[in-house]
Amino acid sequence: MKAIEIRNKYLKFFEEHGHKIIPSSPLIPENDPSVLFTTAGMQPLVPYLLGKKHPEGTRLTDYQKCLRTNDIDEVGDNRHLTYFEMLGNWSLGDYFKEESIAMSYEFLTKELEIPAEKISVTCFAGDEDCPRDTVTAECWKKAGIPEERIYYFGKDDNWWIAGETGPCGPDTEMFYDTGKPKCSEKCNPSCGCGKYVEIWNNVFMEYFKDKDGHYTKLKQHNVDTGLGLERMAMLLQGKQTPFEIEIFSPIMEKLEELSEVDDIASRRIVAEHLRASMMIILDGGIPSNVDRGYILRRLIRRMVRHLRKLQIDLNKLSELIDLNIDILKEMYPELEKNKDRIKNVILEEKDKFGKTLERGEREFNKIITKLQNEKQDTISGQDLFTLYETYGFPPEVTKDLATEKGYKIDAEKFNELFKEHQEKSRMGSEHKFKGGLAGNSEIETKYHTATHLLNAALKLIVNKDIHQKGSNITEERMRFDFNCDHKLTDEEKQKVEEQVNKWIQEGLDVKCEEMSKEDAIKSGAECMFIEKYPDIVTVYSIGNISKELCGGPHVKNTSELGIFKIKKEEASSAGVRRIKAILC
């Protein structure tokens, strides 16, 4: 069964069970500083999991484009992906454990025709905070899973919480038995031997963890589920890796045809990073040296490095992009519409990286000269890491050049430094989501509202055709990207600032309305990524000066904002400017 068929079956099944199909949110979250990318299906639904009413009701389903960055360096093995698609269904205070489990079992056994004997499940074992989840186990027995295929594990395996505090609860995970023999008598779904593969996770949000670590029962019980599409397609097609399914196999075959070197890990890296880069660019990503722009740059450059390692002519990259769009256009028709932009961004970054390689080689030659003068024969791990971290020079390239010149490298020290670097990166990534479901503080809510005023002021003062291209909000400041063909003059910045403060002083009411997407557009409401919004949308109006589709949150009156001050205006990317501002 092809991936697109699994996706369509999933959405149709849950639609027939009373769920509204909502569109996938972009990979780049709008006005969400907690993460670099959308990492899970629940992420765009955080306000509704906290109790806000969703325009489409209490039963929702979708496919969500996701990207996770912690395992970039693991891509190349037989299973890791950075970009993937997550299928999900949600109950926002509607059904709970029994109906959720019954629907999951029915979908797996009836719609996907997975033999019931191939399914095992896990439940929360219980601890001093929360009791053993026997309710979920009984629901599985009622659905059709025998007791011997129901396992209990602790919080590390069967408990879900985003961040350190907030809504949380036990989860139940479904596993597919691949038919491999057990690695030992104790082999079970928690084992990593490959016999059991996790295919679906249903989270039952029935508790709230406070800052002191205490758990209390929630009034609104939610269900949040996630099913990985590529993994499911791999299992149903009887493949060993996701790189063998139809999403990847044509590009893998093309890379093998073009390669002068037989290196399957490099082919996987090129195929995976090309798809991930295309999807990030599709949703507005631009390569840079910070945050999500850095991740995109890193993906493209790693892809280029491995094209070189495969000894594939880099001019073939354009052809590979065309092929990938042709492969994926059934799943993502918008790729074809944005082909030129996607191709321009990737090819321009490829060309820039060529210059990086040149700079790296110059630094490498300086190191060799130093070693010659000191009569040494080994490039230190620190020098190797500096070439990699500072100049983006791949260690494998350094090794090749060193071998050609008769020098060795201290790979052990490099690996030690690299692991430290990875750990710091992971800690930074985890910190990005530390706030979890408890985000949107009072000051962040004010900044969110201020972005609407800034957008309106720029249209009034600078150019009526200005539109928001992105934003990022923290408790310290707001950042706002917008299309503009010139650097703002001091006079323009002053007038924009004065205009925003004038509207703040006027005490304009902020009004929230729900309406159909078509009516919202007809009314003149502005938005980014119109395709991401459901049929019923939320429109926020500020007096008669701003009207935008937005998920919130916002203040009730502009007088709550304080004084608006522009701190910096600079280029963000080609044709896009960036304003950093504060409220005081």
Image: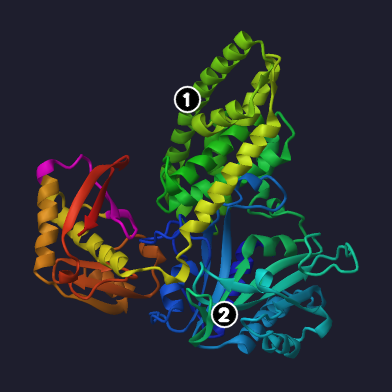
Does residue 256 appear left or right of residue 511 in this picture?
Answer: right
Front-most of residues 370 and 161:
370
142 vs 423: above or below: below
- Residue 43 on image: x %, y %: 48, 67
Residue occupying image coordinates x 59% and y 48% = 423
Q: Which residue is mark 1?
A: 355
Does residue 234 appear left or right of residue 459 in this picture?
Answer: right
Front-most of residues 353 and 553:
553
- Residue 347 on image: x %, y %: 47, 35
Look at the numbered disc 1 and give the secondary structure of its residue.
Answer: helix
**Looking at the image, can residue 526 be seen?**
no
573 vs 168: above or below: above
41 vs 80: above or below: below
- Residue 377 on image: x %, y %: 69, 16
Residue occupying image coordinates x 62% and y 14% = 371
Q: Which residue is mark 2?
A: 14
**Looking at the image, can residue 34 be seen?**
yes
Q: Are marks 1 and 2 in contact (CB under 8 Å)?
A: no
Where does the magenta region start and end?
A: 468-491
